Amino acid sequence: TDPLTAMTTAQDILKALQAPVDWLDRTLVIDVDAGVALAADCDGEGEGDASSLLHNADLAVKTAIQRGGANYAFYNPALAKSAKRRIDILNALQQGLEKGHIEMYFQPIFEASTCKLVGFEALMRMQTPELGQVSPVEFIPIAEESGLIAKLGAWALFDACRVASNWPPYLTVAVNISPEQFYAGTVTTDVHHALQLTSLPANQLELEVTESSVLKDSESVQIQLLALQELGCGIALDDFGTGYSSLSYLWKFPFSKLKIDRAFIAAMDSTPDAKGILESLLSVAQHVGLEVTAEGIEPQEQQNVVAGLGAHFLKGLHVRRPMRE
């Protein structure tokens, strides 16, 4: 019942288990994490019985592993709430396609110089009677961790191509590809099937690849991207300007378009150097033959600035909100 005693006990156990162990001709060091749960925190959840305590300690140890450092963490009731929501979202994802909980929305993309409509970006949305609207920022990572992203990604490709097959030939559709789809090696087959089943010309499909996709196992990703390029699809590097963005991506991989992240666009309003850096990026893209889409355009002033700097395409709430089929 005493948190200080529990913490001291956890620290003593960690210290004992982490002590180097000599085994044969080598020294072994064990990595240990501890989760601490107190009976007082289990009120209303089994009244402190062993099962509830172990469950809560298990939630706490996951937190300790994620954050590192002290190697131990106390159970927090918010952990249980977060874990339950993840389970609810996972259950909804498993039935989402069959029950119609997942739909595709389409955000228009306009040519910067003429404001002419040139295509749409397909965006996955999720809404259930129990959970309401769930953000992609929340459900996509759960789908990736559970392995469901391959199924969802294949469906998204097919549905986007199905809708786009009814559009005029000058309109394109852009579909986001998860890194996990590349690592599973299913992207080329999924794209080929989607195009074949919907009769959409490959040049009307653009595949958006995030930076994290090319950071890991880049040789395998490069082979798949080259195969998609041979099919005739456009390939865009998404969210450029975040993370560890490297200019080497622009010549190592067969990209046809560069998408400037919305956070970078927003920085122009508060960071004096952002506009100059954006201008440099646009110049680099022009020299290597890449078209540029500026994302997250909100006020009219941003549209005027990025168009004046040479961006080819614009997308954002100021330009037009996402819409259903």
Image (cartoon, helix red, strand yellow):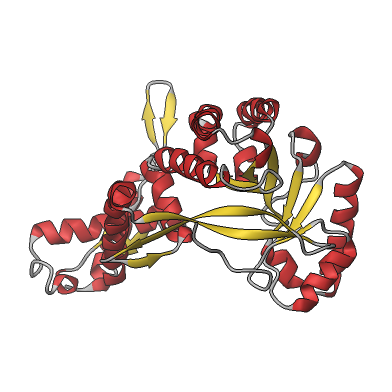
Q: Residue at x 38, y 54 (%)?
A: 102
Residue 89 in the figure: left or right of residue 234: left
Outermost residue, top side: 24
Residue 12 visible in the displayed image = no
Q: Residue at x 19, y 57 (%)?
A: 55
In front: 200, or 94?
200
* Quadrant of res 209: top right
* Quadrant of res 249: top right
Residue 321 in the image: above or below residue 13: below
Q: Residue at x 64, y 38 (%)?
A: 214
Residue 174 visible in the displayed image = yes
Residue 228 in the image: above or below residue 87: above
Residue 210 in the figure: left or right of residue 302: left
Q: Position of residue 251 (x, y in %)?
A: 81, 36
In front: 85, or 169?
169
* Quadrant of res 229: top right
Q: Position of residue 207 (x, y in %)?
A: 63, 41
Image quarter hosting the N terminus: bottom left
Q: Position of residue 91 (x, y in %)?
A: 26, 52
In front: 39, or 102?
102
